[in-house]
Amino acid sequence: MLLHKLVSFLLIFTSLVYSAPLTCEQLTQPAERIDPRNLEGTWALIGGSISYLPYLEIFGQRDSALIHFPSHESVTNISYSRGLRLDGKCMYSTSNITLNGSRFTFDGTPAENSSCVFVRTSCSDCLPMLFDVDSGQRTHFYLFSRRRGLEQDEKNEFMEQVRCLQMPPPVFMDPTKQLCPWPEETLN
């Protein structure tokens, strides 16, 4: 009988430990080393927060956004393209980056004073990206996913990460808004 009670206690205690909320330190840890092959393809912007409120307001005006990582031969020097729809118009840009573990830096100006770290998440097809912009003058935190819409608990995790980073509440994209098509030259 005593053994049965001890086993029951251990099972209950173990389930409580594993269901305990994550700490801010755990929620904002860098992801494990990123394999560039896992980045390949298109990711839709789900939401984001920016430490500088006027930029967050401008961010919230976009209809949709996405990023695309083409396949690369190199495991460190890669590129990615961004596309955003604002007022029905699509705008695109491409950046060359140097990947180092779970971080990357931009190659060349004007983004030479900016870097990014991929943040851990429990969402299997999500890509949280924390940008340090202009040598720490601003912080941008974006959540991308292979899906257009996420479950509420996945959004809640991102909102908790934003809170832990002491940033303004995130703005979420409307998953029904049309994404920009990729121009062929950005996909190669």
Image: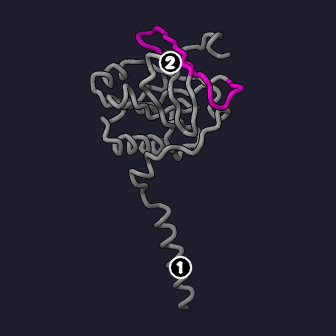
The answer to whether the residues at label 2 and label 1 have Cβ atoms under 8 Å apart is no
Q: Amino acid at mark 1?
A: Ser
Judged by depth in the image, the label closer to the viewer, 2 or 1, is: 2
For residue 94, side relative to residue 74 (left or right):
left
Spot occupied by residue 58 in the image (x, y as percentages of width and height): 33, 19
Q: Is residue 83 magenta?
A: yes
Q: Which mark is residue 8?
A: 1
Spot occupied by residue 178 in the image (x, y as percentages of width and height): 51, 17
Q: Which mark is residue 182?
A: none
Towards the viewer: 16 or 141: 141
Q: Secondary structure at mark 1?
A: helix
Total numbered labels placed on residues in the image: 2
Extreme residue toward the bottom, this view: 1
Q: Amino acid at mark 2?
A: Gly
Q: Is residue 96 above or below residue 21?
A: above
For residue 67, side relative to residue 112 (left or right):
right
- Residue range in magenta is 71-96
Check the picture and name the quadrant holding the C terminus. Answer: top right
Q: CA distance from mark 2 to mark 1?
A: 59 Å
Picture quadrant where residue 49 is located: top left
Check the picture and name the quadrant holding the N terminus. Answer: bottom right
Colour scheme in use: one colour
Residue depicted at 34% across the width and 43% down the height: 163
Q: Earlier in the sequence, mark 2 or mark 1?
A: 1
Give the prevailing secondary structure in the magenta stretch: strand
Residue depicted at 40% across the width and 18% down the height: 62
Q: Is residue 97 above or below residue 122?
A: above
Picture quadrant where residue 88 is located: top left
Mark 2, residue position: 108
